Amino acid sequence: MNGENARAGRGGEKALERLRLIVAEGLCHRCGSCSGICPAGVISPGPDYYPVWDPGDPRCTGCGLCARVCPGAAFSFPEHSKALFGPAADFRGAHGVVAAAFLGYALDPEARRRSTSGGVATALALHLLERGKAGGVFAAVPDAAQPWKPRAIVARTRAEALAGANSKYPACSMNHLFRDIRDESGPFAHVGLPCHVHGLRAMAALDRRVAGKVAVSIGLVCHSCLDHAALGEMLDCYRVREGDLASVRYREGKLPGYICAVMNSGERAYLPYPSLGPDRYRPNAKECLTLFFKLFSPPRCRLCVDSMAEFADIALGDPWYKGWEAEGKLREGYTLVIARTKAGLETLEGARRDGAVALEPFPAEKIPLVQHAMARAKRRRGFYFARKRREEGRPAPEYGFSPAFTRMERIRTGLHALTYAAADRPALRRSIYRFLLSRAGRPVVGALFFRRHVIQPLVEKARRGGVGGGERAGAAAGK
């Protein structure tokens, strides 16, 4: 090896060592940005989507982009907010900048039918592809080998875009796709979780060619991803063989939906407790995920402070808004739509004009009350766990700001953090999980959600002058 190559080799070792430490310290989102920006193609997503590489790969130039782009290690809210929204934008709230807000749904019947909420993400993907406004759309589709696991593709056809419909919760690399479109001019539509959007903005800041390829960024509201073991262990518990599995729908039916395994035979097994009839109580998808996140939330998700896709051009989520008509919209299958930038608003207006989506104005001043508990809890949780890591002498993500919390908020967040105690203890986690999935654990799960199924409906109905819905809910919970 000549002197120049030797220096490049040493630089490559240092750059990849920084990336190795990011992964080893639990700071990796598995977003794929490092492999997407790597000019030499040295890094790839591994089986669980953590980046993998050959430490001695001579192609590594030591540029260090892989570590510099990583949004898991650092993502400056002030810098990226200024670049995207201007210096006056407020980045300290938990809901982000709002240019306009809507409740909407897909006018394409198939797109809406396949979606748990309103299907706006799928409708926008189809509209951009079919109108020639994007050469491809980033999408998460079921992995053919492991149907419960998502796999990222650049969707270029209607069938591929529709395969991306419906929520998929296990962690998924998305931004590595920029490597696949490096030689294409675009434009493309980027669809992903807040971490994917952070990675996109970081990539665009380091490589302007990335910014030129993206026509619009569509962010999906996110509480947390799931480690891949969550569904794998559930299927194993109920002896569902992967070879017999055609697909897993994490939110079958309209919101909140149920987890449903579709077999190759066409038979459908609703999870958990697949032996129960359809009229017996089982936790819905939202309740299951509440439990799963406590046990299977990846380390980096517990450090994330962005639930509302604050740096996307368009943010999409469920219209959870207690006490307002959005609750009814949610049951009908609507999507909360937030336009954050000019590009996002133009995309939405074009889709509405061309008959792809229906959009009803939503009061922008009410956005801070949408997903209120989840957004605030995630913000506090992320900063809490980051502070704890620093106190322990461990690296933590840098966001460029640190909000002030009241003493009561700190106490509540500390107690909330304790509910994740089993997530990093595999033996304890497995024991708890197996018990909750068992016949004996079902009453415990029902008790955990008794307030939501019985008390809360009764209170809400009483406020509205009737109790019929609460009685029905109580009867359902008692079956």
Image: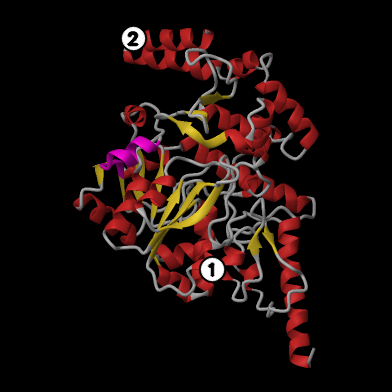
Marking on residue 466 = 2
| Residue 369 location (% of width, % of height) | 41, 37
Marking on residue 435 = none
Identity of the residue drawn at 49% across and 57% down: 197
Residue 178 appears left or right of 134? right
Give the answer, above or below, for where 182 lies relative to 321: below
Give the answer, above or below, for where 271 lies relative to 424: above
| Residue 20 location (% of width, % of height) | 74, 63
Identity of the residue drawn at 34% across and 38% down: 118
Residues at circles 2 and 1 in contact by the CB criterion of under 8 Å: no
Give the answer, above or below, for where 34 lies relative to 143: below
Give the quarter of the figure containing the N terminus. bottom right
Residue 7: name its quadrant.
bottom right
Give, as a three-letter code, the residue at label 2. Gly
Marking on residue 179 = 1
Residue 291: name its quadrant.
top right
Q: For marks 2 and 1, give the CA distance.
A: 57 Å
Disc 1 secondary structure class: helix
| Residue 236 location (% of width, % of height) | 68, 30
- Between residue 244 and residue 321, name the one nearer to us: 244
Give, as a three-letter code, the residue at label 1. Arg
| Residue 297 location (% of width, % of height) | 64, 40
In the rendered structure, which segment of residues is drawn in magenta? Answer: 102-115
Of callouts 2 and 1, the N-terminal one:
1
Residue 193 in view in this figure:
yes
Residue 87 in view in this figure:
no
Residue 4 part of the magenta-drawn span: no
The colouring scheme, among rainbow, by chain, secondary structure or one colour, is secondary structure
- Between residue 254 and residue 364, name the one nearer to us: 254
Q: Residue furthest front?
A: 265
Q: Residues within 10 Å of mark 1 (few under 14, many from 20)?
A: some
Residue 209 appears left or right of 71? left
